[in-house]
Image (cartoon, rainbow, N blue to C red):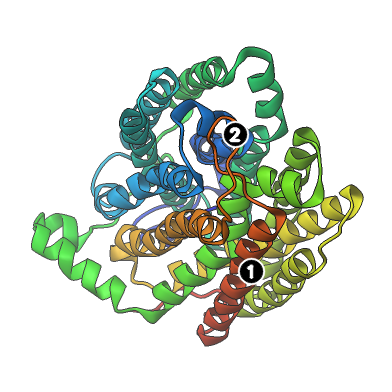
Amino acid sequence: MASAMLADTYPKHGEGGVLARNNSKKAWLVCLSAGLFFFYEFIQMHMFNAINEELRTAFNVNATQLGVLSSTYLFGDVLFLLPAGMLLDRFSVRKILLVALSVCIFGTAGFALTHSLPAAAFFHTVSGCGHAFCFLSCIVLISRWFAPERQAFVVGIVVTMAFLGGVLAQTPLVWLAHAVGWRTALMYDVLLGGVIFAIIFIQVRDFPPGYIKPQNPLKAASGFLDFFQGLIEAARNAQNLLAGLYTSLLNLPIMVLDAVWGVTYLVKVHQLTQIQASNVTAMIFFGSIVACPFVGLLSDRIGLRKKPMIWGGILSLLSILLVVLIPELHYPSLLVLFFLIGLFTSTQIVSYPLAAESNDSRITGTAVSIVSFIIMGGAALAQILFGKLLDLSWNGLLGEDGQRIYSSLDYQHAMWMFPVAIGIGLLAALLLKETYCRKKEV
């Protein structure tokens, strides 16, 4: 997902800024335009699911190697998450957005054109470096353009936009790849990135009119020692660690099934066609699209963060257990179950404002980076782990092209990682402290 937290709360007039209520149209335009970058990055993150077999053939890799290739995107993201927080605490969000998007477009183009596995890994890593900035930038802008009582709802809308990008990377990308080839399909993806760059360049601004930027002690000192002091402070906050763990583990169905393995799992275990399988994996996104704005609004209205997270963890665990425990599920049942998984795991978005409310505003970007590091690092390891579990179960069978053939039992064994992960995420939610939608007092 996913992946980061809400930034510092919007200050009142006379205390570092003015509320954007009088210019809500512009606020929405700025934040949704920035959200298009998040939408675009979700396409890059999840495209392997649609072209899994094509990539295995093109680069002649096994399951573990494909998992590693896919995870290079997330490792590139993790590599820049801590610098991203530092940079967003200090420099223009608009400029950072444009540079990061350019980097992502370059990486996507390079990946589409190369025939070398090391080069493909490099370009996919480059694309991931750009991803480190997309959601963090949106969150900082939301914190400046919207009042605190509206931020969870706006975050839900932005996350919904990202999930729409994930939907585009499922069945539509399968169709396009079948029609023109996966390399040409990715070049169309590059053109889409150019259009989004133009929109962000025209529409996004760092601050609403009349906003007075709060003095940041870290920036005033302008030293790396001060940054690392903030980093240590954020890392010591158990709320950040638990929120990151919860979101990371509830995101795994999206980050593993929708990003890499979902289609091949459904084709092998449930004998679906590739189009049917991509439709099923897309249902996780549709469930999240329906639920994210509602969950954010509900949390704001009831004034609670922890309770929705706990119920989301329980219902997510029950849904994924049905998928794992019932070996023979038909197409309609799979559509419903994957929709429910997306619906219930959407409560992970509540951890973003919860974590924001648990940190001093002066280290918001740094705290966001800590949480994002856990979220994306966990996803990267999980993509590799799923492939490793397949290879550990593999019985040695090879196809005519020399590719490993994995049985339905291999996939069923690997799927058990999801109930275990979500169970641990539920435990993390239980250990969180409730913030009651109030910012931490300093």
- Frontmost residue, 122 versus 410: 410
Please tell me which residue is depicted at 28% across the width and 50% down the height of the picture: 79
- Image quadrant where one finds the C terminus: bottom left
Query: What is the x, y in percent for residue 28?
Result: 58, 40
- Quick check: 23 above or below 326? above
Quarter-of-image position of residue 204: top left
In the image: residue 436, left or right of residue 118:
right
Amino acid found under the numbered disc labelled 2: Glu
**Residue identifier under label 1:** 416
Query: What is the x, y in percent for residue 35?
Result: 53, 39
Please tell me which residue is depicted at 69% across the width and 47% down the height of the picture: 285
**Residue identifier under label 2:** 53
Amino acid found under the numbered disc labelled 1: Trp
Please tell me which residue is depicted at 47% across the width and 42% down the height of the picture: 66
Label 2, secondary structure: give it: helix
Crowding around mark 2 (Cα neighbors within 10 Å: few <14, some 14 to 19, many 20+) is some
Query: What is the x, y in percent for residue 217?
Result: 18, 62
Please tell me which residue is depicted at 60% across the width and 16% down the height of the picture: 181
